[in-house]
């Protein structure tokens, strides 16, 4: 258990009334990064450990929360936490967002985003916090949204408040390990518009003062950064549900050994994370059908259905791009880049679907022919042989 004993930091000597400036915990850290001043809005399960960690590593950190009871407990020194390794010694509290913004260079928003109805997120707390910050900011000011929000939230707020530089910076924490997770993330994601590059660099500098490892950095737009957080969490739940389904249906199997394998490289870390046209080949489709027969796995059935749907979406794009009797050239016959094996390859799946229409279809023609559309089935394909101005559908575009 860690407790916080603090007192209001004021410009006067009597300290009798509420502060003009900020609330100062007694053992204030003074280290590198002190020139950067950060306000953390929302002192909950993420915000309070984050604020304390920033302060511990020498960043002058201010905190604010709308929860009066929490603020009073922090002020009185009666607040306790069960979160290990938390140290709020350098944290200063401010009685309002206005005072916090006036004294800082950026604000990190860590407010709650509860579920209103199934699948409907309430981002009103984030919207209110950013709105208050925008009102308080008399200069261009940086706002970092660390809360989990629906993709598009930051972009909407950026359009609404052009005086702000809004950055999406999702974080991944597990309760009980919040401080260690903040100090040792495997990946850091920063999302912002072009005009926020300087602010993103400043935020990166702040994190570099905190990090105890060397994470992989991803710089992207705010919508993608927000999406990454949801996608990652969804994938974790899918894995847990998938393992649970195996346990329920795979009789006579040592599930602990299966889990051990999957936890130690069975997934080929880094592999299969590119969004191509679909999967194929002599093994994956066949083994997935075997798997569904053995386990009756709804996830496997969904994977097969999704694979067919992706070919269908590619078909739709072709149908609505060229005449009904047009010529389609499919490039990349093999089931993966560079392979001559075409068993259930995406190229053959697409050609089969197109055969039910009046399209003229050629796969890897030699020599190259004129066509209404050229469909690239492999990533990073050489298009120098194609006619100038050719219409190209790259199934790996932006993958």
Image (tube, rainbow, N blue to C red):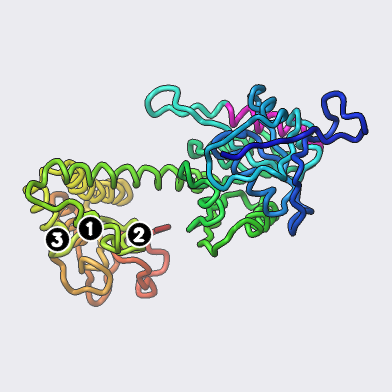
Magenta span: chief secondary structure: helix
The answer for how far apart the CA atoms under marks 3 and 1 are is 9 Å
Q: N-terminal of the two: label 3 or label 2?
A: 2
- Residue 227: give x, y in percent of width and height: 46, 44
For the residue pair 331 and 359, the one nearer the viewer reads as: 331
**Residue interval drawn in magenta:** 125-138
Q: Residue at x 38, y 63 (%)?
A: 390
- Residue 100: give x, y in percent of width and height: 76, 36
For the N terminus, the image quarter is top right
From the image, tell me which residue sits under label 2. 274
The answer for how far apart the CA atoms under marks 3 and 2 are is 19 Å
With 74 as the anchor, is 324 left or right in this view?
Answer: left
Q: Residue at x 91, y 29 (%)?
A: 14
With 101 as the anchor, is 267 left or right in this view?
Answer: left
Does residue 58 show up magenta in the picture? no
Q: Which mark is residue 344?
A: 3
Q: Quadrant of residue 153?
A: top right
* For the residues bearing labels 2 and 1, Cβ distance under 8 angstroms: no
């Amino acid at each position: 258990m860690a407790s916080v004993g603090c007192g209001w930091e004021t410009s006067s000597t009597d300290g009798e009334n509420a502060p003009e400036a900020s609330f100062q915990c007694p053992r204030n850290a003074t280290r590198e990064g002190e020139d950067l001043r950060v306000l953390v809005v929302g002192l909950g399960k993420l915000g309070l450990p984050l604020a304390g960690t920033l302060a511990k590593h020498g960043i002058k950190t201010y905190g604010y929360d709308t929860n009066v009871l929490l603020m009073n407990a922090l002020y009185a020194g009666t607040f306790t936490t069960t979160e290990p390794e938390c140290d709020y010694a350098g944290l200063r509290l401010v009685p309002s967002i206005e005072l916090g913004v006036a004294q800082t260079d950026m604000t990190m928003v860590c407010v709650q985003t509860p579920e209103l109805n199934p699948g409907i997120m309430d981002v009103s707390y984030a919207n209110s916090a950013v709105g208050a910050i925008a009102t308080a900011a008399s200069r261009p000011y940086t706002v970092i949204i660390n809360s989990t929000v629906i993709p598009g939230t930051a972009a909407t707020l950026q359009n609404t408040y052009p005086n702000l530089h809004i950055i999406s910076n999702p974080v991944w924490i597990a309760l009980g390990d919040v401080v260690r997770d903040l100090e040792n993330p495997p990946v850091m994601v920063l999302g912002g518009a072009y005009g926020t590059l300087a602010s993103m660099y400043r935020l990166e500098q702040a994190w570099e003062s905190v990090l105890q490892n060397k994470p992989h950095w991803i710089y992207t737009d705010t919508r993608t950064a927000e999406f990454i957080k949801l996608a990652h969490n969804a994938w974790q739940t899918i894995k847990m549900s998938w393992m649970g389904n195996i346990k329920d249906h795979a009789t006579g199997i040592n599930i602990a050994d299966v889990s051990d394998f999957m936890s130690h490289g069975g997934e080929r870390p880094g592999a299969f994370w590119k969004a191509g046209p679909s999967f194929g080949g002599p093994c994956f489709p066949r083994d997935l059908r075997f798997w569904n027969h053995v386990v009756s796995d709804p996830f496997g059935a969904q994977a097969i259905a999704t694979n067919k749907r992706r070919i269908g979406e590619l078909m739709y794009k072709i149908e609505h791009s060229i005449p009904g009797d047009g010529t389609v050239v499919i490039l990349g016959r093999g089931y993966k880049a560079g392979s001559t094996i075409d068993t259930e390859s995406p190229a053959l799946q697409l050609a089969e679907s197109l055969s039910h229409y009046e399209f003229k279809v050629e796969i890897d023609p030699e020599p190259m022919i004129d066509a209404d559309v050229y469909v690239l089935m492999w990533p990073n394909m050489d298009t120098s042989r194609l006619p100038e101005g050719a219409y190209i559908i790259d199934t790996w575009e932006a993958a």
